[in-house]
Amino acid sequence: MVQTRSLIDEHGRRTDGRTMDELRNVKIQVGIVKNADGSAYIEFGKNRIIAAVYGPREVHPKHLAQPDRCVLRCRYHMSPFSTDTRKNPAPSRREVEISKVMREALEPSLMLEDYPRAAIDVFVEVLQADGGSRCAGITAASVALADAGINMRDIVPACAAGKVDGKIVLDINDVEDKEGSADMPLAYMPHLERVTLLQLDGILNQEEFNECLDKALQGCKMIYEIQRRALIQKYFGDEQELKEES
Amino acid sequence: MQEIKRKYVVPGDRIIDGDFRALSNVTKSGNSIFATRIGIAEATRDGIKVIPLSGVYIPRVNDIVIGKIIDHSSLSWQVDISSCFSAHLPAQDVFGRDFSPARDDMNKQLAIGDLVTARIMAFDRTRDPMLTIQDKDLGKIPRGEFLKISATRVPRLIGKRGSMIQTIEQATQTRILIGQNGIVVVAGRSAEGTQLAIRAIRMVEEEAHTSNLTQRIKTLLNVPEPQSIETISELAAPEGQKLDGSSSSIPEAEEQVQEDLEKGDKE
């Protein structure tokens, strides 16, 4: 990764004006795909992503069914118009990989043993890509799974942290991802305090890694609050403040 | 038992700490009980449960469901019960014990596309649900408009002791069959009545968790409302209590489901 320009100015502001510990704007809407059993739309900075969940439903082809648990299938896909140059709609190596890590990040949160011989399909469609689309995709997919009423141990928020201009920053955007020196996406179950995804692209020493991990965990906790609010808004509307009834 | 207040939960929320039994849609970890679905958590005498507000239908033994015949083999019909498992209705159940695949024509009894009301006779993790129509008010549905709602809205559609469904039936002069799996069949004397009933059912589905729903349904159906005890108490209650009163109708309705469903089917 060759650094070509300064990504943090003298006031400690990043290319998009954020401080080191600031997330991009995150907005989540629940239940926007009526045909799906559960769905969510997320705006994560400039990312625009739809996640739709179908199931539990019958498995086709039948031989994929597991006798003791449900099969989780994930598809991460970037639309041809999601990037500045046209993206070939055929699944790329990167998309196949992200589909796999997304499934592995969501699986521990789901009680798949409750639905033997069935399948849950998760579709994540990136309409507009900025950096961190896998984290935004996992965040939206987890909300969509909760919306679909699938038994879950916890909701999974995801967020990246990384190293830019020698400093550890939260929530890497597209420019920082390409020109920075490290990017570490992380998915985390806040109630169970378990990490379900951790990838690292770049080089960090032990101290930097620890700092990066702490920042990403903080980011996940902030995103969890947004996920929770979005779900409560859909199901309980304006009553969300009356969490406890008298 | 320690008192807990009913509250809104999303998956992963800790409901309560202590020695409680975990009933439905909750999981016990250590000394705490956590929610596994979006819904309303509450404590009953038996333990802690969450009344879910979303989710597909998962069959349970003795549920009354409405299904659509999608295929048949020489010994049984395959029935779509709007779940992740398709159900089987054995031919012997319809023809009796002396059924012979060579002699009896299965299409004469139930053809592909027919709707049936049936009870789930057997179901577990290892096999698909088995249906029976050997009971009162079960069997082929001769006519009616078919619609699907979420299975989690069925208790609200039935209402307390069948109040909601009775209101709709009386106001629209229709007969409404409701399956626990969220399939509803509306049969009416006039097309207008049927359409109005469908609109009311859709409204219940969309606004199931909101307050004062019965009143809005009555307004939609133009039901002249005498000052009932319920209405008076709602009018007299302050704003906060009104919200509480309405949301409590969801769990109470669920407890009544089996009884009410049978009642609904009879009517």
Image: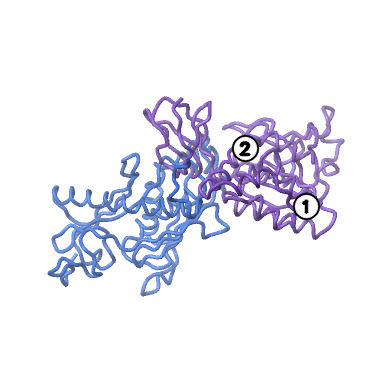
Q: Viewer-proximal residue, B95 or A141?
A: A141
The dot on residue B59 is 2
Query: Label 1 is found on which chain of the structure?
Result: B
Which chain gets the blue colouring? A
Which chain gets the purple colouring? B
Extreme-front residue of the structure: B236
Q: Amino acid at mark 2?
A: Pro
Counting from the top left corner in percent of width and height, residue B161 is at 69, 38
| Residue drawn 27% across the image and 49% down it | A217
Q: Quadrant of residue B129?
A: top right
- Judging by the rendered image, the residue that carries numbered circle 1 is B171
Look at the numbered disc 2 and give the secondary structure of its residue: loop
Counting from the top left corner in percent of width and height, residue A216 is at 26, 52
Using the rendered image of the protein, determine whether residue B93 is visible from the camera's viewpoint: yes
Using the rendered image of the protein, determine whether residue B130 is visible from the camera's viewpoint: no
Of the two numbered discs 1 and 2 on the same chain, state the one appearing first in sequence: 2
Quarter in which the C terminus of chain B is drawn = top right
| Residue drawn 37% across the image and 74% down it | A85
